[in-house]
Image (cartoon, rainbow, N blue to C red):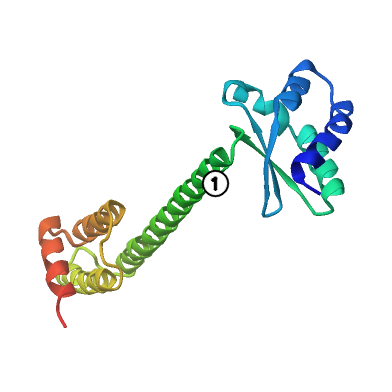
Amino acid sequence: MDFAQAWQEVLPEIRNGVTGMGVWTALNLSQPVAVEDGQFVLGLPNESTDLSGHLKMHSTKILIERAMASKLGIPIIARIIDGVTVADWEMAKRKDVEVRRLQQQAIDRAKAEMKSETSWESVYEGLTRKNAGILNKSLPQNRAKFYIEAVELVAEALRTSPITSELDERNFARVLERVAQYADVPSVLVAQAVLEKAVEI
């Protein structure tokens, strides 16, 4: 059955299942736009899009989906859009793609930040443990031994986890400051030693 005809046939049934002038008005103004990928696309004229919330209410949406699914004989998800033309539906799909792209971008960024945080955090904690295991920290030779081992540890981390973001830079700097604090060496010299060590083959 044609989806537009199906909509006209189920509309009275849906109206009987809802109450309120707003939702009635929205149903009366709505127009079927398409059935695509299991979605029944229902649009409202641009001057009436403020009524779309009535159609998106869970109870109303369920009524629409059940009625259209029964009439068309396929599972249906109701999609309410602004506009009543196929061009409006194409625009809505393009917006969907952009929203998904931005969501994926945010997820990827969060994962990268978590990975960076975890990687440099483990180095930071490793330095803390290494320093805690040093006996007679006040002796310069022991601090020097810690310093040599710490530079190697941080340089290796830099080789395996290159700096690719501002967050990486901040976490790397935090680690360098920790080495400087424990070894009693200026942080600039620590950074120099690590950077030189990291490029050694």
**Relative side of 198 to 47, left or right:** left
Q: Is residue 25 above or below residue 112?
A: above
Residue 126 in view: yes
**Is residue 43 or residue 58 the one in the foreground?**
43
Query: Which residue is denoted by mark 1 in the rendering?
Result: 93
Q: Is residue 89 above or below residue 25?
A: below
Q: In which quadrant is the C terminus drawn?
A: bottom left
Residue in view at x 78 percent, y 32 percent? 60
Q: Amino acid at mark 1?
A: Lys
Could you say whether the residue bearing mark 1 is in a helix, strand or loop?
helix
- Relative to 101, say whether 164 is above or below: below
Q: Is residue 186 visible?
A: no
In the figure, residue 169 lies in which quadrant?
bottom left
> What residue is shown at x 83% (from left), y 32% (from top)?
11
How many marks the image carries: the answer is 1
How far across and down, in percent of the image, does residue 142 sit?
Answer: 20, 71
Residue 128, x across and y down, in percent: 33, 62
Toward which corner of the image does residue 43 lie, by quadrant?
Answer: top right
Observer-nearest of 31 and 168: 31
Task: Classify 10 Å Cα crowding around label 1: few (below 14), some (14-19), many (20 and above).
Answer: few
Residue 1 pos. (x, y %): 81, 49
Q: Which residue is found at the position 87% from the left and 29% from the top?
A: 12
